[in-house]
Image (cartoon, rainbow, N blue to C red):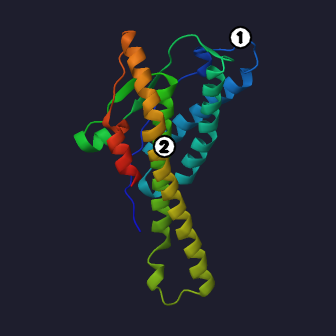
Amino acid sequence: MSSYLYELPTTGAISFGDFCYDKSASYISEVSDTTEARANLRAALKAYKRSDDNEKDYLRLVKVLDDYIPRLYGILAALNAGELVLRSEPIFSWRTTLSSTLFHTSPRLSFPSLTAELAFTLLTYAFALSNLARAVVASLGAYETERGISDAGRRAKDDRLQFAVTLLCKAAGVFEYIAKNVLGEWDAVRERVGAAGMSCPHPPDLSREVLIGLSK
């Protein structure tokens, strides 16, 4: 089993308190915690980018994303319920990576809306899951043909291999979820912000065709 090693994006700093108005003061800690979780993600992505291949901490990055994603959904839910209000349209910056592989350039682009943030965060999550699966498989070696391995050792490696399969299946599900659930909402947001005179790039990284292909 093998999988593609994805280059991961980096992202700019942002504070949710700058654009989320908490009229009832009920979400002060949630807004602050979400800002902190995203800062942790930004730091983890920068550390990942700067580390050598054999020193990359794939599991830590997945855990950081596991912490941030539910908090981001919580902010979105509070906004949809009217419990939080946007002071202004937030602008998130992300450096695209599939584009860099195809066109040998990795531009830092600015994307309005929390929907764009959700799309890029989930895309990064799927990349990270796939990279972690690849690292797990690489750590096993060719144990299937190893004569000296004990039954217990073989079972342990079989379990690790199954863990890698689970990670790849989860990554595929995230790619498909973005394509089928998030992009439709993002299309509507792009139309809205475009009508307001704001630029909203649409990189190939977040095209339905690419995402469906990645999910296969």
Count of number-bearing discs: 2
Q: Amino acid at mark 1?
A: Lys
Q: Observer-nearest residue: 161 or 193?
A: 193
Which mark lies nearer to you, 1 or 2? Answer: 2
Point out the tag, 1 or 2, that comes first from the N-terminus. 1
From the image, tell me which residue sits under label 2. Answer: 177
Crowding at mark 2 (Cα within 10 Å: few <14, some 14-19, many 20+): some
Q: Is residue 91 above or below residue 149?
A: above
User: Where residue 108 sits: x, y (%)?
Assistant: 36, 29
Of 185 and 148, nearer the camera is 185
Q: Quadrant of residue 15?
A: top right
Q: Nearer the viewer, residue 167 or 67?
A: 167
Give the Cα separation between the discs numbered 1 and 2. 32 Å
**Residue 212 image offset from top left, x and y in percent:** 37, 47
- Whether 92 is drawn above or below 167: the answer is above
The residue sitting at 60% across, 47% down in the picture is: 63
Whether residue 15 appears in this view of the structure is yes
Name which residue type carries label 2: Tyr
Callout 1 crowding tier (Cα within 10 Å): few <14, some 14–19, many ≥20: few
Q: Dots 1 and 2: beta carbons under 8 Å? A: no
- For label 1, the residue is 23
Residue at disc 1, secondary structure = loop
Pick the residue in front: 197 or 103: 197
Residue 57 visible in rendering: no
Q: Position of residue 79 (x, y in %)?
A: 62, 20
Instruction: Give the residue displayed 45% in from the left and 40% down from the top.
Output: 180
